Image: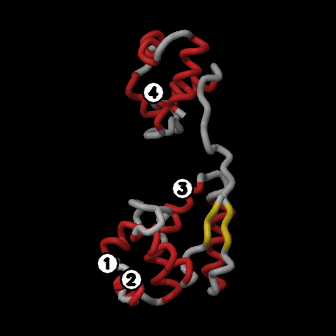
Amino acid sequence: MIKHTKELIKKNLGINLKTFCIQNGFDLDTLNNLLSGKTKGDREGTNAYKIKQFLIEHGLFTQENEKETVQIDTDNIKNPLLKNFFIVTFNKKFSTKTMKEFIKFTHKKVPAILDLYFDTTVQDYIKDTYFIEKNINAKDFSQFCFGTSDGSTKGSKAYFIKQKLIENGILPIISK
């Protein structure tokens, strides 16, 4: 996104980002944060919002993955209440979210899902021989649940955790 917008500014205006900011009274750091995705520019009144609106009005801002389609497969989930939870949550809250945001949301819900739907704690759940064989401890499981890894890298601890949660019908299969 940042490279494309930089190119649009340079091509259409014939200037670099620093000059663009000076000419329009914008902060260069805020512009860079907006273009790199560190800030969304969604809150009205903020500098990032003003910059984003200016760029959109002048056709200089493009958002990648804005209309990303996320598919959820709950066939692996045997508990009808849990299956319904994912279907309702997915349809109501995540119709316009990116896949990464949806995955992060579902992973954060794992401890509560274990407690509410399976009447177990994370500590008890990871005592399974599968986790012991893969050398996965409570810290690894917590890191998975709270977003340090999405489990997409094959062979990683997060990958093994994700596969086991899908296999046990705790998480749905999420894909593009």
Sequence-first disc among 3 and 2? 3
**Quarter of the picture holding the C terminus:** bottom right
| Mark 2 residue element | helix
Q: Which residue is mark 4?
A: 31
- Whether the residues at callouts 2 and 1 have beta carbons within 8 Å, the answer is yes
Residue 72 image offset from top left, x and y in percent: 66, 67
Q: How far is the residue under mark 3 from the one under mark 4?
A: 23 Å
Crowd rating for badge 3 (residues with CA inside 10 Å; few <14, some 14–19, many 20+): few
Sequence-first disc among 4 and 1? 4
The quadrant holding residue 66 is: top right
Q: Is residue 43 left or right of residue 56?
A: left
* Count of numbered badges drawn on the protein: 4
Up-down: is 63 above or below 50?
below
Residue 68 image offset from top left, x and y in percent: 66, 50
Crowd rating for badge 4 (residues with CA inside 10 Å; few <14, some 14–19, many 20+): many
**Nearer mark to the viewer, of 3 and 2:** 2
- Amino acid on which the number 2 mark rests in the picture: Phe
Q: Residue at x 50, y 88 (%)?
A: 118
Up-down: is 108 above or below 8?
below
- Amino acid on which the number 3 mark rests in the picture: Lys
What number is the disc on residue 100?
3
**Nearer mark to the viewer, of 3 and 4:** 3
- Whether the residues at callouts 1 and 3 have beta carbons within 8 Å, the answer is no
| Mark 3 residue element | helix
| Mark 1 residue element | loop
Q: Is residue 166 left or right of residue 69?
A: left
Residue 46 image offset from top left, x and y in percent: 46, 31
Which of 50 and 58 lies nearest the eye of the viewer?
A: 58
- Whether the residues at callouts 3 and 4 have beta carbons within 8 Å, the answer is no
Q: Which residue is mark 1?
A: 137
